């Protein structure tokens, strides 16, 4: 499930319907996902709840209208879902630290809460390893075991060539990796356990120079283009198989083979 796309679509819908009566349940239903998981994922990507995002955006836009227009404060309050001047003034003062009338009179610099981009906002504005948006493909199923003598080097290959994410969980007395994971999605998201594991378990050992993974992806041509753009040429052309699917193979930095199909 492409949660980045779902959350981005949700934010676009909020922006387009900012004056309508909307809540998390309505937004989750529009994206055909569980409201419980939707609200969890929204908080992960946006660092705020759905209701906080809607309220903060409404207060920001209301502030612009207070300063830049002559529309009555009551009309602005009604436009942004408040049924009285009093309730709007309380919410406005809590957000901006000043009443609407005082803000209009002094033309004060008001607080602004900008539209969020889930990709740039992930993990506090950092994309730890790679870019989901740039990558253009999604791994749907995997779970292979991978052996490597140099786990740091291999992890960096997955990051640089495939655009994956990863971390080394255990090291020996010489600081060499003993166990780690690389994953199609950020480790922070995987740790929520709301979707099947779509990564690879890495162990220290002699590489198995054969096919070690057969992985379902969405966007196999984008996978091919992305890997080639990273300067890695040990990837086969995308082939349409007799059973109707498409496949390609990537030979890794350790000489093992990952086969992808769609």
Image: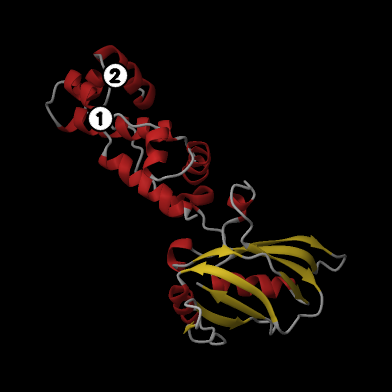
- How far separated are the C-alphas under marks 1 and 2? 10 Å
Q: Position of residue 14 (x, y in %)?
A: 32, 40
Residue 244 - label: none
Q: In this picture, is 60 found above or below 46? A: above
Quarter-wise, where is residue 78 in the image?
top left
Reading the image, the residue beneath label 1 is: 62
Question: For the point 49% across and 86% down, which residue is it?
Answer: 237
Residue name at image x 67 percent, y 64 percent = 143
Mark 1 or mark 2: which comes first in sequence? 1
Density class for disc 2 (Cα within 10 Å; few <14, some 14-19, many ≥20) is many
Proximity of marks 1 and 2: CB atoms separated by less than 8 Å: yes
Percent coordinates x, y for residue 170 in the rendering:
80, 60
Residue most toward the left? 70
Quarter of the view holding residue 77: top left
Quadrant assignment, res 203: bottom right
Nearest the viewer among 32 and 186 is: 32
| Foreground residue among 187 and 88 | 187
The residue at 31%/43% (across/down) is 13
Residue on which the image places disc 2 = 88
Q: Judge whether 17 appears above or below 105 on screen.
A: below
Q: Is residue 249 left or right of residue 228?
A: right
């Amino acid at each position: 499930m492409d949660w980045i796309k779902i959350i981005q679509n949700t934010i676009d819908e909020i922006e387009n319907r900012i004056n309508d009566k909307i809540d998390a349940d309505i937004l989750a239903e529009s994206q055909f996902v569980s409201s419980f998981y939707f609200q969890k994922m929204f908080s992960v990507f946006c660092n705020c709840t759905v209701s906080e995002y809607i309220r903060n955006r409404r207060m920001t836009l209301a502030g612009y209208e207070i300063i830049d227009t002559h529309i009555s404060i009551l009309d602005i309050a009604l436009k942004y879902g408040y049924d009285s001047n009093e309730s709007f003034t309380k919410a406005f003062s809590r957000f901006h630290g000043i009443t609407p009338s005082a803000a209009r009179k002094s033309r004060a610099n008001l607080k602004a809460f900008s539209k969020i981009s889930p990709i740039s906002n992930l993990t506090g504005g950092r994309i730890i390893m790679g870019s989901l948006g740039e990558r253009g493909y999604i791994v749907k199923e995997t779970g292979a075991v991978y052996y490597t003598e140099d786990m740091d080097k291999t992890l960096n290959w997955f990051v640089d060539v495939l655009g994956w994410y990863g971390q080394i969980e255990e090291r020996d007395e010489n600081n060499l990796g003993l166990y780690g994971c690389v994953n199609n999605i950020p480790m922070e998201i995987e740790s929520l356990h709301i979707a099947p594991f779509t990564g690879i378990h890495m162990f220290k050992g002699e590489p198995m120079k054969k096919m070690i993974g057969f992985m379902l992806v969405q966007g196999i041509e984008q996978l091919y283009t992305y890997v080639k753009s990273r300067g890695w040429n040990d990837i086969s052309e995308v082939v349409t198989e007799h059973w109707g699917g498409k496949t390609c193979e990537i030979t890794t930095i350790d000489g093992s083979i990952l086969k992808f199909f769609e």
